[in-house]
Image: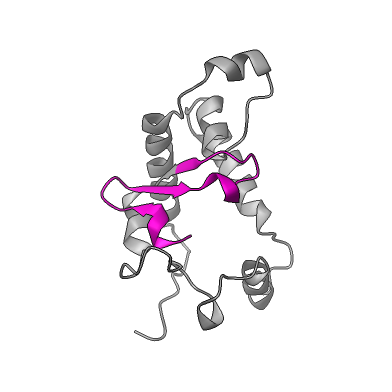
Amino acid sequence: MTWGEIDQTNGLWIVPAHRMKAHKEHRVPLSAAALALLPERGEPDALVFPGTGGRPLSDMSLTAVLRRMGRDDLTVHGFRSSFRDWAGESTHHPREVIEAALAHRLKDKAEAAYARGDLMTKRRALMQDWANYLTKPRAGVVLLRDRTA
C-alpha cells in the first residue's frame, strides 16, 4: 500500500489493477478505525507500512508474527476467511456485498455483465460494522499496549 493509493478525504484505498489477482482496480472503503491506524502521510510512492529498510513487507511477515505468538494454528489467509464467516453468519449484509468486499468475481457471466457498480455505499457500511466488531471491548480479553509508548 502506497500513500498515492490512499484517499483520506473519502476514506478509500484504491488498489491498482496490476496488483490485483483479477487485474481490475479495487476500491476499499476505510472505516474511521482503519484511517486512525495510518501513520503520518508520506510521499505518494512511499509505502504506508514499510518493512525493514523501507522495503515492502514480505508475504511471510504476518506468518512470522503468528509464529512468534505461538499461533501455528492460524494462517494469514484465515483472516480473510474469518471476515467472510463473520459477515455471512453474524450480519444481514447481502452475500454479493460480502463477496465484493473480498474482491471476488461473479461466476455467472451474464450476471457479471450487468453488475457494473462496486456496491461502495453498502461495502462501506459492512466495513464499518467489521471495524465495530473488531474494536468492541470484550470481557476477559486483555488488550496489549505499545511498549514504546
Residue found 40% across the figure and 30% down from its top: 122
Residue found 25% across the figure and 49% down from its top: 9
Residue 48 drawn above or below residue 107: below
**Residue situated furthest left in the rendering:** 9
Q: Is residue 76 left or right of residue 125?
A: right
Q: Can residue 127 be seen in the rendering of this structure?
A: yes
Give coordinates of residue 84: x percent, y percent: 59, 40
Q: Is residue 145 left or right of residue 94?
A: left
Q: Looking at the image, which is closer to me, 84 or 118?
A: 118
Task: Examine the image and state in which quarter residue 148 appears.
Answer: bottom left
Extent of the magenta region: 1-27
Residue 8 drawn above or below residue 102: below
Q: Can residue 136 be seen in the rendering of this structure?
A: no
Residue found 41% across the figure and 77% down from its top: 145
Task: Examine the image and state in which quarter residue 135 appears.
Answer: bottom left
Q: Is residue 35 left or right of residue 20?
A: left
**Residue situated furthest bottom in the rendering:** 148
Residue found 69% across the figure and 24% down from its top: 107
Q: How many marks?
A: 0
The structure's colour scheme is one colour
Q: Looking at the image, which is closer to me, 148 or 22?
A: 22
Residue 111 drawn above or below residue 101: above
Give coordinates of residue 22: x percent, y percent: 64, 39
**Residue situated furthest right in the rendering:** 72
Q: Tell me the quarter of the image containing the C terminus.
A: bottom left
Give coordinates of residue 112: x percent, y percent: 60, 20
User: Does the magenta run of residues contain 29?
Assistant: no
